[in-house]
Amino acid sequence: MARSMRDIKRQIKSVQNTRQITKAMEMVAASKLRKAQEKAEAARPYSEKLKEVVASIAAGSQGATHPMLVSRPVKKTAYLIVTSDRGLAGGYNANILRKVTMLLAERHKSKDEYALFVIGRKGRDFLRRREYPIVEEVTELSDTPKFADIKSIAYSAVQQFETGVYDELYLCYNRFVNAISQVPTVDRLLPMEPVEHQEKKAEGLHAAYEYEPSAEGVLEVLLPKYAETLIYSAILDGKASELGAKMTAMGSATKNASKMIGNLTLTYNRARQAAITQEITEIVAGANAQS
């Protein structure tokens, strides 16, 4: 019984140490989440306004066209997938990777029909083990990523669509809602989906613009930047989602550790009480035997 009590006490100490680690990780994630959330939310109005400007130019300029606006027969599709470099983030990585693999299985009969651009070590390792066609990867992003960190992969994906290597480009990431809710999302990035313009926002005159050197020239500059901006915005959403998922997962782990410590402590007290009772019984039995 004494050895069993030592084992229980040792287990309690082990769980207490684990709880200290998970609590510290929860606090670190919580401290970083606010800044990541602010950056993700600040990027959305900019990308939405840029989309509005691009759509306005494309719709208001007769004959203005660009490869990023034109749908073509789909022979090969590219997917840019955003995951994390580290685990201990609940279902953050598993949810988006499950959604992507199911989508690939539904839409494609062969791995020759698509290519993957992967951000994050967890996604890269998962897809590489299953021999998915990864053409480019970026890992070891900081918790506050800058556009320069993902510029190369964003530029490569957009340029290869523009030159006809791929006929579609999809963006796969976890959209941040709040600290406990992250939605696995797959959006078609290119070709840009047409935006319906409200012809009658208000009664009155509508301004007409002239573009220098031309509307096509403006679109040629803006569209790649617009696509790269959306990719960067998805990275910021993904980082906020990762920290939110990590904070929630570590919070749950801390609560479970506390509950386990309570159960183990109860078991230890019962074992100690049983040992004391056994000792008293032996003493009484010995005393009765001598009398």
Image (cartoon, grey):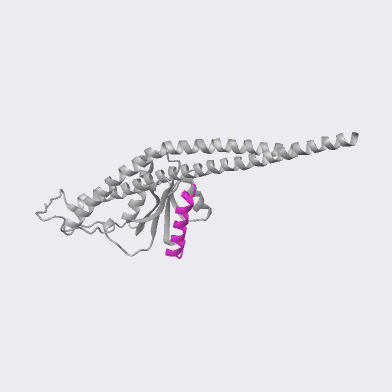
Q: Main secondary structure of the magenta part?
A: helix
Residue 215 shown left or right of residue 230 in the figure: left
- The percent position of residue 131, horizontal first and vertical second, equals 51, 55
Q: What segment is highlighted magenta in the picture?
A: 90-111
The answer to whether residue 281 shows anywhere in this view is yes
Task: Using the image, determine if residue 26 lies above or below residue 199.
Answer: above
- What is the residue that sits farthest to the front in this orientation? 291
Q: Residue at x 36, y 56 (%)?
A: 187
Which image quarter holds the N terminus?
top right
Residue 272 shown left or right of residue 95 in the figure: right
The answer to whether residue 147 shows anywhere in this view is no
Q: Nearer the viewer, residue 92 or 78?
A: 92
Q: Nearer the viewer, residue 213 or 249?
A: 249
- The percent position of residue 262, horizontal first and vertical second, equals 60, 40
- The percent position of residue 41, horizontal first and vertical second, equals 32, 44
Q: Residue at x 36, y 49 (%)?
A: 156
Q: Residue at x 45, y 41 (%)?
A: 140
Let me know if residue 79 is in the magenta part: no
Residue 30 shown left or right of residue 160 in the figure: right
- The percent position of residue 48, horizontal first and vertical second, equals 27, 49
| Image quadrant assignment for residue 164 | bottom left
- What is the residue that sits farthest to the right in this orientation? 290
Q: Residue at x 44, y 48 (%)?
A: 83
Q: Nearer the viewer, residue 33 or 52?
A: 33
Task: Using the image, determine if residue 106 lies above or below residue 151.
Answer: below
Which image quarter holds the C terminus?
top right
